[in-house]
Amino acid sequence: MNRVNPVGPRVKRRSPDQKGIHDIRPLADPEFDGIWESLILPPGLKNRLLAQAVLNFTARAKLQQVFLPLHGIILLVGLPGTGKTSLARGLASRAAASLGGNFMFLEVDPHALASASLGKSQQAVTHLLGSVIGEEASTGPCIVLLDEVETLAADRRKMSMDANPIDVHRATDAVLTQLDQLAANNTQLLFIATSNFAGAIDDAFLSRADLVVTIDLPSPEACQAILLDTLGRIAQVYPKVARLRTDPLIDKAAARAVGLDGRRIRKAVLASLAHTKQIAVNPETLTAQAVLQAVEQAQAERANLEANP
Ligand SMILES: Nc1ncnc2c1ncn2[C@@H]1O[C@H](COP(=O)(O)OP(=O)(O)O)[C@@H](O)[C@H]1O
Ligand SMILES: [Mg+2]
C-alpha cells in the first residue's frame, strides 16, 4: 500500500467539508479518550472491542479473504442513549493509540444520505464510500464511524412501497458492494457501525460484520456509577456538589434510575440543576432530593413515551 502522502503530513489534511463526512480528525484524540474513560460498561466489553479493532489492523492483511473473511466491520447495536456513538469514537482512539501510527478518523453523517435524498442516494453512497473513504484509506490507516447505519444499509424488506423501494434497494446494494471492495482493497481500514434498530439492518450487512456487540441498558451498578460520575463532573465546576455523592437519597435516585439509558441518567442530573430557580442561580445548592425528583421525572417521561410511541 502506498503510504506516501504527497500533500504533506496527514494531520494537516482537509476539514470536514466533504458532503456526508461529519467529522475528520487524526487519532489518537484526547477528547475521544476522555469519552472512552467516562463510559461505564460491563466488565470486559471494552477490552473485547479493542482486541477486535487491533486484530483488524494486525492480521487482516495477512489473512486470505476467501477462507478467512474479515470485513473490517464492528457493529454496535442497542437502544438510543446507551453510549454506542461515544463508544465507537473512544474505541477508534484507543485502537489507534494501541497500534501507533498515522491514523485518521472519519465520521459519516447518516442524514446526508437519508431518505430526503433517496433519489440520489445510490450515487451519493458510491461517491462517499468509494471515493472519499477509499482515498483516505489508501493513504494510511483509517477508522470510519458509520453512525446509525440502518439509514445507510436499510433493510429492503422492511421499507414500505411509497419510500422509493427501488432506490432503497439500489442504495443498499451500493453500500454492500462498496464495503466489500473497500475491505478487499484496504486492509488498513476499519468501519465501526452503530445502530439503534438491529431489526432494520439488512441481513447481508449483518453477516459482514466481524463482531456484533449489543449494548444493553446500564445495570443497577452502572446506573449508580453514571449518576455519581455526572455529579462528580458537576462538582468539578461547583465543588460543594461533591457532598451529595455520599447522600443516601442519591443511592435511592440511582436505584430509581434503573431502566433509563445512560444519556437520560446524565440529563436527569443536569435537569436537577434547574429544579428550582435558586439552584439554577447557585448550582452549589443542589440537593439530593432534587436529583431524585429529576430521576423520577425522567422515568415518568420514559413511561409516557413507551405508552405513546
Ligand atoms: N454506559 C454509559 N456510561 C456512561 N455514560 C453513558 C453511558 N451510556 C450513555 N452515556 C452517556 O449518554 C450520552 C449519549 O451517548 P451516545 O453515545 O450518544 O448514545 P447512543 O449513540 O447509543 O445513542 C453520552 O453523553 C454518554 O456519555
Ligand atoms: Mg448514537
Image (spheres, rainbow, N blue to C red):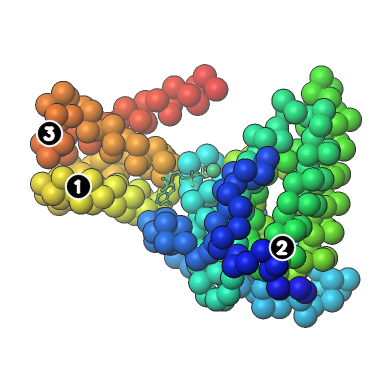
Residue 100 lies left or right of residue 198; in this view the side is: left
Name the residue nearer the viewer: 34 or 200: 34
Where does the N terminus fall, quadrant-wise?
Answer: bottom right
In this picture, is 258 found above or below 89? above
Which mark sits nearer the N-terminus, 1 or 3? Answer: 1
Splitting the image into 4 quarters, where does residue 133 fall? Answer: bottom right
Q: What residue is pinned by disc 2?
A: 137
Of badges 2 and 3, nearer the viewer stands 2
Residue denoted by label 3: 282
Instruction: Say whether residue 77 is left or right of residue 169.
Output: left
Residue beneath the point at 73% across and 41% down: 152
Local SS, label 3: loop
SS at circle 1: helix
List x then y, in percent, for residue 121: 79, 35
Q: Is residue 50 above or below residue 133?
A: below
Mark 1 to mark 2 CA distance (whole Å): 41 Å
| Quadrant showing the C terminus | top right
Residue drawn at x 22%, y 36% as measured from the top left: 291
Task: Name the residue rendered at 22%, 33% in the picture.
Answer: 273
Asked whether disc 1 touches disc 3, contact meaning CB atoms under 8 Å apart, the reply is no
59 to the left or right of 238: right
Q: Please, what is the three-letter code of the amino acid marked with disc 3?
A: Asn
From where the camera sits, is residue 73 visible?
Answer: no
Q: Residues within 10 Å of mark 1 (few under 14, many from 20)?
A: few
- x and y percent of residue 288 in the render? 16, 39
Q: Nearer the viewer, mark 1 or mark 2?
A: 2
Q: Earlier in the sequence, mark 1 or mark 2?
A: 2
Q: Where does label 1 land, which residue?
A: 237
Q: Nearer the viewer, residue 59 or 161?
A: 59
The number of numbered badges drawn on the structure is: 3
Query: Which disc is residue 133 wearing?
Result: none
